[in-house]
Image (spheres, helix red, strand yellow):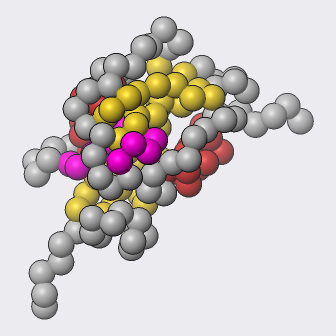
Amino acid sequence: MPKQKIFVTVDVVVFKSMDTSAEILLIQRKNEPFKNQWALPGGFVDQEEDLEIAALRELKEETGIKIVSCEQLYTFGKPGRDPRGRTISITFVGFTDNAALPKAADDAKDARWFTIKKLPELAFDHSKIIALAISRFLPGPPG
């Protein structure tokens, strides 16, 4: 049987406030693929690293924002989602207070908050990840 080459990554959806004007943290990618496009903070999991620890590490490395914990959202693994090869991403959701100021570092060219109602075009399948996070973690409009 041929050896499979599958990469494991983590992506983090971080919300600031939980009302109808909630904002989400995005980074502008410094490198290919999708150079200069906006994406969720995230990256590759180290060989002996716990998934949640990897998510919190990538968030801090790329944005300077540290959160205490995050909750697993879903695993995205559709073939072709990453042009670099077969990549499975375990996604997490976390929350921070309104005073959190991102500072781009590591693989991020820029990092900033965007209102969930006005997001830029996103890299990879991150619009699907964000839509799922919003549906599961933010309150819907009053009924």
Identified at 26% across, 37% down, the residue is 107
Residue 138 is left or right of residue 9, and the answer is right
Of residue 46 and residue 63, the one placed in the foreground of this image is 63
Q: Quadrant of residue 4?
A: bottom left
* Quarter occupied by the C terminus: top right
> Looking at the image, which residue sits at the far bottom?
1
Given the current orientation, which residue lies at the most extreme front position? 36
The quadrant where residue 81 appears: bottom left
Rendered location of residue 125, percent (x, y): 48, 57
Check if residue 142 falls in the magenta segment: no
Quadrant of the image containing the N terminus: bottom left
Q: Residue at x 47, y 19 (%)?
A: 96
Q: Residue at coordinates 38% horizontally, 29% vertically from top-left?
A: 110
Q: Is residue 136 above or below residue 34?
A: above
Q: Residue at x 69, y 35 (%)?
A: 117
Which percent across, then down, holds residue 41? 37, 38
Q: Who is closer to the viewer here, 42 or 118?
A: 118
Q: Position of residue 8 (x, y in %)?
A: 25, 57
Instruction: Residue 56: tell me if it is visible.
Output: no
Q: What range of the chain is rendered magenta?
A: 35-45
Q: Is residue 22 above or below residue 4?
A: above
In the picture as drawn, the residue positioned furthest to the top comes out as: 99
Work out whether residue 3 can be spotted.
yes
| Residue 69 position in % (x across, y down) | 36, 28
